[in-house]
Image (cartoon, grey):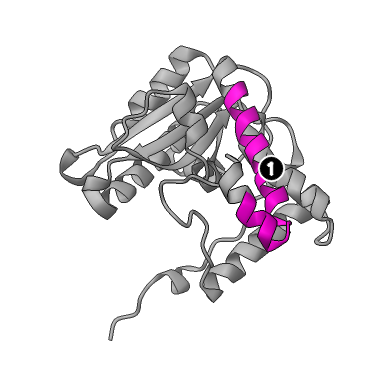
Amino acid sequence: MDYIDVLKTRRSIRAFSDKPVESSLLDEILREALESPSSSNSQPYKLAVATGDICKKLGEELQSKYYRSNKIQKQPLPLKLLSAITTDALPDSDFKPILGKYPPVFQERRVATGMGLYEVLGISRDDKKARDEQMARNFIFFDAPVAIFFFVHPGMKHTALVDAGIMMQSLMLSATNKGLGTCAQGALGIWRSPIDKFFKVPKDYKLVCGLALGYPQDNKVNQYRPDKIDLDELLIPAK
């Protein structure tokens, strides 16, 4: 594919087929992503790549935590406090809060994107059950056969996050170029403990987010593409 076709074809895939990704192809994508630039070539990131049974079991555990945590959030305050002591369902993210309050302009974009997605899915705004179920699909990676978790070394401060973002984009574009789809998922940074259960993650590395990867299913949700801001809104004018 031409570069511009790869760039414009890439989108967040939220329905994957059950076709497995060949290990040689996955390695090729990861090697191409390693060509990404980083601050002083520090490469302050590590990836945990889940496939096969590990991917399935990890997804089941993450989704279970989501449902249990969601149930706790709906309880009265005294029960919430009790649950904080007695359950392992509450978030244990490395970066807190993982999803804070959005400033107004970004909240508007977030809401517009969410409403557009739910419209494509046929989910009404007041259908909380369907919205919860759709959110829960994040944690089984939208049925993708590969889940990748991104970790950074905090000693590199904010540059580690910048470098991880560049690397993630390279990985997504490489996958797109090879006919695969991806979905970058901030929600996969909410719980770290399940990942530590399946991978020997160095303790000095912090979980940032995750990414689903696989072959896109023929599903209308995969055609959804939210609007981008105009160039005039992007650029800062000169004084």
| Residue type, numbered disc 1 | Arg
Question: Which element carries disc 1, helix, strand or loop?
Answer: helix
39, above or below 54, in the image = below
**Relative to 85, 142 lies left or right:** right
* In front of the other: 4 or 211: 211
* In front of the other: 177 or 85: 85
Local crowd size for mark 1, using a 10 Å CA cut-off: few (<14), some (14–19), many (≥20):
some
The residue at the point 73 percent across, 56 percent down is 75
Q: Position of residue 122 (x, y in %)?
A: 83, 51
The residue at the point 52 percent across, 14 percent down is 22
The residue at the point 61 percent across, 22 percent down is 57
Q: Position of residue 69 (x, y in %)?
A: 65, 46
Q: Main secondary structure of the magenta part?
A: helix
Please tell me how many numbered marks the rendered image carries.
1
Looking at this view, name the residue that lies furthest to the left: 40
Report the span colored magenta: 56-82
Is residue 162 shown to the viewer in this render? Answer: yes
Q: Position of residue 39 (x, y in %)?
A: 20, 46
In what quadrant of the picture does the C terminus appear? bottom left
**Relative to 112, 100 lies left or right:** left
Assess whether residue 62 is covered by the magenta stretch: yes
**Relative to 227, 34 lies left or right:** left
Q: Position of residue 120 (x, y in %)?
A: 77, 51
In this figure, which residue is indicated by the disc labeled 1?
68
177, above or below 168, in the image = above
Is residue 176 shown to the viewer in this render? Answer: no
The residue at the point 73 percent across, 45 percent down is 134
